[in-house]
Image (spheres, rainbow, N blue to C red):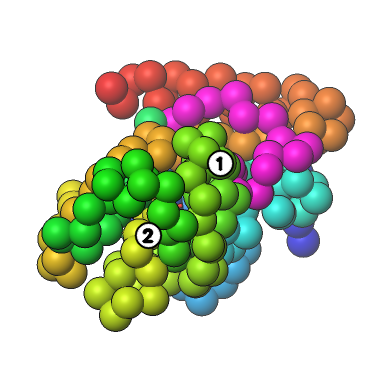
Amino acid sequence: MTAALSIALSKGRIFDETAPLLARAGIVPSENPETSRKLMIGTNRPDMQLIIVRASDTPTYVQHGAADLGIAGRDVLYEHGGDGLYQPVDLGIATCRMMVAVRKGFDYAGAVQRGARLRVATKYVRTAREHFAQKGVHIDLIRLYGSMELAPIVGLADAIVDLVSSGGTLKANNLVAVEEVMPVSARLIVNQASLKMKRALIHPVIEAFKAAAGGRR
Ligand code: PRT
Ligand code: MG
């Protein structure tokens, strides 16, 4: 059975930081997705359920209307492109920064100035391509799926584009951040057709998230 409204979100930091906002919006999951193996989780509201997806898949589920609402990082939304998605609320959670980082001692400014062709490893290929195109820097993109921090150390790339929050991971791997690409936080996203068809149900949820996100600060 599917509930009237579904919210797609990922386990881990997105769920952890969304749970208090959900609670403030009056939505309490009936199971903890961190420990449950269920991918569809009911809530205290019979008309609302959570769909647990991979973080980078959230916009896809919402775009196709497989979920009415979703919670996704700006990083993920930027890579996806945001087609068919309405983004009414910056939730101000799961914040970090998308950064360019290099091996300590690598002369990034010099390389850019000389017009050297940079090898850039990342899973954020669209973001990286647009960032360097805007700067007029030529790059060779190397697409990775994770552990980007390894690439400069083993000589796979000159630079990486990755998310940084505490900076601990960069530090532990002898890397330094040299440039900000964009600040990142998680957004509430809504399927545009759902918004039209289920406006009476969805509008109060959007307002509740706005209030919850505002009250959090
Ligand atoms: O882990 P999985 O491959 O399933 O997917 P995912 O990595 O996309 O999901 P998850 O749950 O790790 O992240 C979900 C969202 O959280 C991301 O899309 C971001 O919007 C947001 N977020 C906030 C972060 C971070 N902070 C973050 N620090 N996502 C990832 N990181 C990683 C970063 O990639 C790096 O490897 O943490 C490491 C750096 O952390 P520090 O604290 O050492 O700087
Ligand atoms: Mg992760």
Magenta stretch holds residue 152: no
Q: Is residue 7 left or right of residue 44?
A: right
Three-letter amino acid code at the position of disc 2: Ile
Q: Nearer the viewer, residue 137 or 58?
A: 137
Mark whose residue sits in front, 2 or 1: 1
Q: Nearer the viewer, residue 110 or 31?
A: 110
> How far apart, in angstroms, are the residues tagged by discs 2 and 1?
15 Å
Magenta residues (range): 73-91
Residue 191 placement (x, y as % from top left) = 75, 38
Kindly identify the residue that appears in the image at 53 percent across and 26 percent down.
89
Q: Is residue 153 left or right of residue 46?
A: left
Q: Which residue is mark 1?
A: 133
Three-letter amino acid code at the position of disc 1: Ala
Residue 145 against residue 141 in the figure, above or below: below
Figure quarter occupied by ligand 1 = bottom left
- What is the quadrant of the C terminus in the image? top left
Characterize the local packing of mark 1: few (<14), some (14-19) or many (20 or more) Cα atoms within 10 angstroms: few
Q: Secondary structure at mark 2?
A: strand
Q: Which residue is mark 2?
A: 160
Q: Nearer the viewer, residue 34 or 188?
A: 188
